[in-house]
Image (cartoon, rainbow, N blue to C red):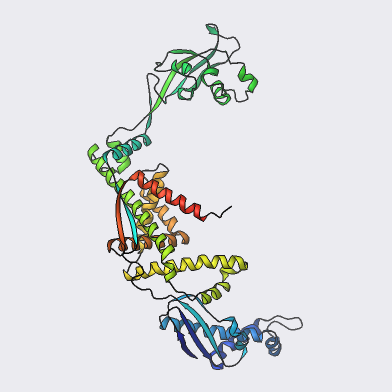
């Protein structure tokens, strides 16, 4: 078999493969014998169908399969040997009408290949400008975050008088004058959440009320006639609107038996161990320093993310046109791929535009990846995923997960091929952006912002991008 690189450009190659009968004859014979040995046909025992009949029925397909196998194997070896960086798979152009050639004893088959073009080193330059939003953390922000952590780790404690946000449990009795109404509502235990009261006059009756005291109030007025609140208070799940109205003018006594409220965590060792890990922080000063460091790391990650997204946007909008692809060859490959199997011509055209845009972006990113010899190792991937998992767990209230829990979540995430691939690509993009920033490849203007300002900038840019993607109505 003779393989020749008949033509090569920066983004395209043509390979001619000359095949002789001896290149595929043995494989052809094996395929024919295998089909003959297993063929079943009415009137013949299995494996005894005449070969002439087998050839008549399957000869052409056996021939094509044997030739295709021989050519594909040699072709891929040749591409690796020549170190051709291809986009998609080699194709036989339809206009060459080579399908019939595969049935000849000897033939020359032509393949077209789309290649990844070489990019110039000045595809990005000092004329390109981006802003790096340098986040700052001040003492007020540290204090605010510390208080949020204290509230998040609050505990319910018993109280001796009612305070804001307290839960109160006690005995409720419907009154007739100064005495319990005969046949009226009487409960030994029901709960009141005073902050849910909408009437300030009734609410004031409970303010600072001590345990074991009795409050006389109008529940209907206190809760603004809200049926859901009165049903819960009276323990009457099937109350109708008419029944609710019966209590519009009713007075009730409420004997306060228990008071509990949420008390935010104190700045003690128990709190420090829960938030920062066992025995890592011992004083409030150390806790503030550790928290500030974590906040700076988190918002620096946000700043790096924003810079990476802006760089990708710059490349997509202004640089992809500089990547010259063999688009006709790529289109031909795409149309024959599994991706386009059930797509209409309109869908193919639309998807091809996105494909070309994505290919050009990836080629530029890979150009800098190769230039800086960047690589995402398995260890890098695990560490990134570990941080991602810890952050996700913290968002659902698990600030100190066990190692087994973290490791299990990491393994589960990395077993997902889509997560693994997307994470690797995002990490490479961030590594490229960092090197471009460090090496002053482009002009970077630094602007100091607070964490809240940075978050707003990120959210606003996300909303702007989303609005641009929506089709016009």
Q: Based on the displayed image, in which of its 4 quarters is residue 381 positioned?
A: bottom left
Q: Is residue 31 visible?
A: no
Q: Based on the displayed image, in which of its 4 quarters is residue 127 positioned?
A: bottom left
Rendered view: 417 above or below 41: above
| Picture residue at 57% right of the left edge, 9% below the top | 181
Q: Residue 110: horizontal and vertical position, in percent?
A: 53, 86
Rendered view: 305 above or below 318: above
Residue at the top extreme, as displayed: 178
| Picture residue at 34% right of the left edge, 52% below the top | 303
Whether residue 113 sits left or right of residue 141 in the image: it is: right
Residue at the right extreme, as displayed: 43
Q: Based on the displayed image, in which of its 4 quarters is residue 378 positioned?
A: bottom left
Q: Nearer the viewer, residue 295 or 447?
A: 447
Q: Nearer the viewer, residue 142 or 308?
A: 308
Q: Residue 278: horizontal and vertical position, in percent?
A: 29, 43
Q: Residue 137: horizontal and vertical position, in percent?
A: 28, 44
| Picture residue at 37% right of the left edge, 31% below the top | 155
């Amino acid at each position: 078999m003779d393989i020749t690189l008949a033509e090569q450009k920066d983004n395209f190659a043509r390979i001619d493969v000359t095949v002789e009968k001896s290149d595929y004859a043995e494989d052809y014979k094996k395929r024919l014998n295998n089909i003959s040995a297993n063929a079943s046909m009415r009137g013949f025992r299995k494996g005894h169908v005449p070969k002439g009949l087998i050839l008549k029925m399957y000869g052409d397909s056996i021939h094509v399969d044997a030739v295709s196998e021989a050519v594909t194997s040699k072709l891929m070896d040749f591409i690796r040997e020549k170190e051709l960086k291809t986009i998609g798979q080699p194709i036989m152009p339809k206009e060459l009408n080579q399908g019939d050639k595969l049935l000849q004893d000897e033939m020359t088959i032509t393949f077209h290949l789309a290649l990844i073009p070489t990019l110039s080193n000045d595809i990005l330059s000092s004329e390109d400008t981006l802003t790096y939003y340098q986040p700052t953390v001040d003492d007020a922000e540290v204090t605010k975050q510390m208080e949020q952590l204290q509230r998040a780790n609050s505990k319910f404690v018993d109280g001796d008088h009612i305070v804001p946000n307290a839960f109160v449990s006690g005995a409720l009795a419907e009154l007739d004058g100064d005495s319990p109404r005969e046949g009226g509502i009487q409960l030994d235990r029901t709960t009141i959440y005073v902050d849910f009261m909408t009437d300030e006059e009734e609410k004031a009756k409970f303010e600072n009320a001590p345990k074991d005291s009795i409050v006389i109030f109008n529940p209907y007025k206190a809760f603004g006639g809200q049926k859901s609140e009165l049903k819960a208070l009276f323990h009457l799940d099937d109350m109708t609107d008419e029944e609710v109205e019966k209590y519009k003018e009713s007075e009730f006594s409420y004997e306060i038996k228990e008071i509990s409220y949420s008390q935010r965590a104190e700045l003690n060792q128990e709190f420090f161990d829960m938030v920062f890990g066992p025995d890592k922080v011992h004083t409030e000063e150390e806790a503030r320093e550790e928290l500030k460091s974590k906040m700076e790391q988190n918002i620096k990650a946000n700043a790096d993310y924003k810079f990476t997204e802006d760089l990708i946007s710059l490349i997509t909008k202004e640089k992809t046109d500089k990547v010259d692809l063999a688009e006709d060859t790529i289109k031909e490959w795409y149309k024959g791929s599994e991706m386009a199997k059930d797509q209409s011509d309109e869908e193919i055209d639309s998807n091809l535009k996105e494909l070309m845009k994505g290919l050009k972006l990836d080629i530029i990113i890979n150009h800098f990846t190769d230039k800086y010899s960047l690589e995402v190792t398995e260890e890098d991937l695990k560490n990134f995923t570990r941080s991602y998992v810890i952050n996700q767990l913290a968002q659902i209230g698990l600030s100190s997960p066990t190692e087994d829990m973290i490791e299990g979540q990491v393994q589960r995430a990395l077993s997902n091929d889509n997560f693994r691939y997307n994470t690797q690509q995002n990490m490479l993009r961030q590594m490229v952006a960092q090197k471009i920033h460090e090496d002053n490849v482009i002009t970077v203007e630094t602007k100091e912002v607070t964490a809240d300002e940075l978050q707003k900038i990120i959210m606003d840019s996300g909303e702007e991008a989303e609005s641009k993607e929506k089709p016009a109505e």
